[in-house]
Amino acid sequence: MVAPSVLMIVGTDTGVGKTRTGRALARRLCRGGRRIVAIKPLETGCTGPPTEREDGVVLARATGQVEPGHALLRFRDPVAPPEAADREGRQIDFEALVRRAREHAARASIALVEGAGGLLSPITWERSAVDLGRALDARVLLVAGDRLGTINHTLMALQVLELGRLDVMGIVLTAPEQPDASTGSNAAAIARLSGPRRILSAPRLTSLEDASRHLEEVTKWLDLA
Ligand SMILES: Nc1ncnc2c1ncn2[C@@H]1O[C@H](COP(=O)(O)OP(=O)(O)O)[C@@H](O)[C@H]1O
Ligand SMILES: [Mg+2]
């Protein structure tokens, strides 16, 4: 069997548009008739039963998958996963989490995996999203906000990805709610400073269908046979 293609959606930070990008990309890829699974390995800030406010649920709805219907591991407090786990007296088994993610990925031709927080946000006190990407043999889609500060954040993230020997498929810059003087110029600046790269500036589209159409370019980066 051909190994599933795992694409990890990582961010320069939390709140930069990973989930928005992931759900739109998942929807687009589903249109191509492929079996897509979208996975949120860990999610914090989850109180009570899973609701549509949770990333894991949003991603599952975008593909229509039954399993997983929500994040593989859910924690109550909206803090980094190992801190949230400590507060509940739980432990995060990194290897078991990787196994579960791989099992889901194996049932699809492409698995989208959304990281928690930013690239170096811890998954356990020993492992980060970079380690998860390596463990899943993932390629990476880096998501950043198209706003002041993103040049620095994006270049730092690219260096971290390079150190972690993760293959960066491309970068999506998401439009902020309030554009600033840098919005619209950051993609060219990042390309100029980091060398030729695939960078897509994504406008702030509210409809899932529009957002998904706009990510057509990213599906080409995936180079699907
Ligand atoms: N195109 C958009 N239109 C409306 N709201 C958006 C858009 N993109 C992002 N948001 C809002 O910005 C916030 C952060 O986006 P999200 O995708 O959840 O980021 P992340 O997954 O990186 O934490 C969310 O509240 C989301 O609803
Ligand atoms: Mg998210």
Image: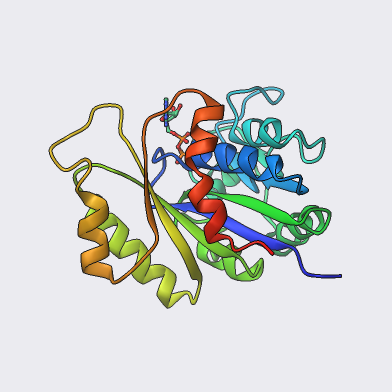
Residue 183 place in picture, x, y as percent: 21, 40
Taking the view exactly as shown, the residue that stands out farthest to the left is 181
Residue 138 place in picture, x, y as percent: 61, 65
Quarter of the rendering occupied by the C terminus: bottom right
Quarter of the rendering occupied by the N terminus: bottom right
Residue 165 place in picture, x, y as percent: 49, 77
User: In the picture shown, does residue 87 fall above or below 151?
Assistant: above
For residue 57, side relative to residue 164 (left or right): right
The residue under the point 40% across, 56% down is 171
User: In the picture shown, does residue 220 fall above or below 70?
Assistant: below
Foreground: 22 or 136? 22
The residue under the point 21% across, 67% down is 193
Foreground: 187 or 103? 187
Foreground: 191 or 124? 191
User: In the picture shown, does residue 18 fall above or below 119?
Assistant: above
The residue under the point 44% across, 60% down is 170
Q: Quadrant of residue 66?
A: top right
Q: Quadrant of residue 59?
A: top right
For residue 67, side relative to residue 166 (left or right): right
Taking the view exactly as shown, the residue that stands out farthest to the right is 1
Foreground: 50 or 75? 50
For residue 54, side relative to residue 63 (left or right): left
Judge whether residue 173 can be spotted in this image.
yes
Residue 62 place in picture, x, y as percent: 66, 33
Number of marks in picture: 0
Q: Quadrant of residue 220?
A: bottom right
User: In the picture shown, does residue 202 fall above or below 177?
Assistant: below
